[in-house]
Amino acid sequence: MSTKAESLKATKPTKADGHQRVLGCLFMCAGLSRSGIAKATGMRLSSVCGRVNELIVAGKLSVAGIQRDSETERNVETVRLA
């Protein structure tokens, strides 16, 4: 039987899991903001921001443009698959 620490480690999502969730979301819905990705995937916004930034640096995502967020009335970047 495994220890509690091993069990928690086994269920904790990895960065690679987050990358796949973000990429999958953008495959289905191109041109989303980071908050839109967070809502669609159920991930925390801070996690989405980290994964999106890593994917931009890796060349897998690119900034698609700027749009107005209807909830916050702020301009936000949208991203898409590169």
Image (cartoon, grey):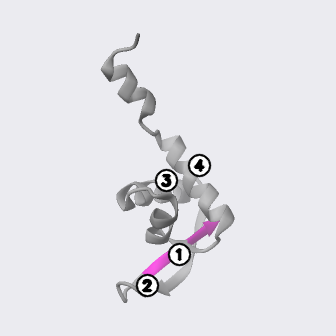
Residue at (48, 77) in percent of width and height: 77
Residue at (49, 71) in percent of width and height: 36
Label 1: state its secondary structure: strand
Indicate which label's residue lies in the foreground, 1 or 2: 2
Indicate which label's residue lies in the foreground, 1 or 4: 4
Three-letter amino acid code at disc 2? Answer: Asp
Give neighbour class at mark 1: few <14, some 14-19, many 20+ (Cα, 10 Å): many
Residue placed under numbered mark 3 in the picture: 54
Using the numbered discs, state the Cα–Cα distance from disc 2 to disc 3 in whole angstroms: 23 Å
Looking at the picture, how far across and down is residue 25, in whole percent?
A: 60, 61
Indicate which label's residue lies in the foreground, 3 or 1: 1
Three-letter amino acid code at disc 4? Answer: Gln
Using the numbered discs, state the Cα–Cα distance from disc 1 to disc 4 in whole angstroms: 18 Å
Image quadrant holding the C terminus, namely bottom right
Indicate which label's residue lies in the foreground, 4 or 3: 4
Three-letter amino acid code at disc 1? Answer: Thr
Numbered badge on residue 69: 2
Three-letter amino acid code at disc 3? Answer: Glu
**Disc 4 to disc 2: CB gap under 8 Å:** no
**Disc 4 to disc 3: CB gap under 8 Å:** no
N-terminal-most mark, 4 or 2 = 4
Give neighbour class at mark 2: few <14, some 14-19, many 20+ (Cα, 10 Å): some
Numbered badge on residue 78: 1
What's the magenta region? 76-81
**Disc 2 to disc 3: CB gap under 8 Å:** no
N-terminal-most mark, 3 or 1 = 3
N-terminal-most mark, 2 or 3 = 3
Label 2: state its secondary structure: loop
Residue placed under numbered mark 4 in the picture: 20
N-terminal-most mark, 4 or 3 = 4
